[in-house]
Amino acid sequence: MSSIRYIISAPSGSGKTTLVNELRQYVPNLEFSVSYTTRQPRGSEQDGREYHFIPREEFEAMIERDEFLEYAQVFGKYYGTAKSVLRHAEEMGHDLLLDIDVQGERQVKQKMPDAVSIFVLPPSRKELESRLRKRSVSENVHAEDVIRRRLDEARREIENYPNYDYILINDRLEQSVDRLQAIVLGERIKRSGKPPSPQEKQYLASAEKSLKANMQDKIRDILGTFDESAPAATEAKR
């Protein structure tokens, strides 16, 4: 069976990084792609863990050498996924988890239509604002306009949900990790071509609940919490 590429995207502050870190503890043979960026590290971020932080000149040289699977500019800063991570996962016989934004998702899906895309949402605008404020303290960022800009950007990003296969609302961490695990393992089960065991049937049933077609009402409710709030401008973050 060929390796599966999973794409996971989320508005800034949705808890995606925590979910991914938890997932990787439970799911074997899953490579994680660390993106490249030309922006500066924030808070406790470390080179090679959250991102590979490189100079703009180096990033543009990688573009010239066609080394990126996908890349984009967000507010003047480059972000991209190197093709080398895909090759490494294939050589190891592992699946690959790509942590990329809505722009990157479109690029990867065009090149790899069979990739599995997962969009992580906060349960509401109020909860997202609370998380952003808590994170701003840890990052030593206290500018109110930054939080407002990120909230507005989140609203625009959520509108891209129709492009994704699965929708995961990150309300309670433990349940969200279980649902994410079910999606990843469920896709492996479906593509294995083997009859599922009783345990595997549970993963498949859980994953099905997160299919986009089964999440429409909940997505509309979340979007409604943003519509009820005053519009504001935000900073995109990959």
Image (cartoon, rainbow, N blue to C red):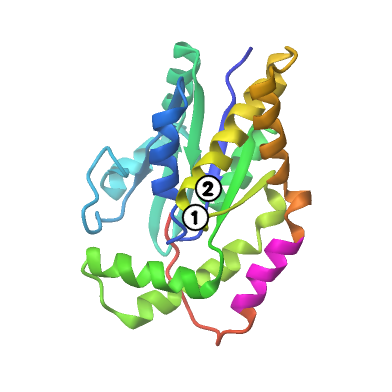
Q: Residue at x 25, y 58 (%)?
A: 42
For the residue pair 80 and 190, the one nearer the viewer reads as 190
Q: Label 2's element?
A: helix
Vertical side of 115 occupied by 140: above or below: below
Q: Position of residue 128 (x, y in %)?
A: 47, 68
Identity of the residue furthest to the right in this view? 213
Identify which residue is drawn at 43% across, 79% down: 148
Answer whether labels 2 and 1 touch (C-beta < 8 Å).
Answer: yes
By secondary structure, the bulk of the magenta-drawn segment is best described as helix
Query: Distance between the Cα atoms at labels 2 and 1?
Result: 6 Å
Residue 199, percent from left and from top: 64, 23
Question: Over which residues does the magenta segment extend?
Answer: 217-226
Q: Is residue 36 above or below residue 154?
A: above
Which mark, residue 172?
1
Q: Amino acid at mark 1?
A: Arg
Residue 12 visible in the displayed image: yes
Circle 2 residue:
176
* Percent of width and height locating residue 201: 71, 26
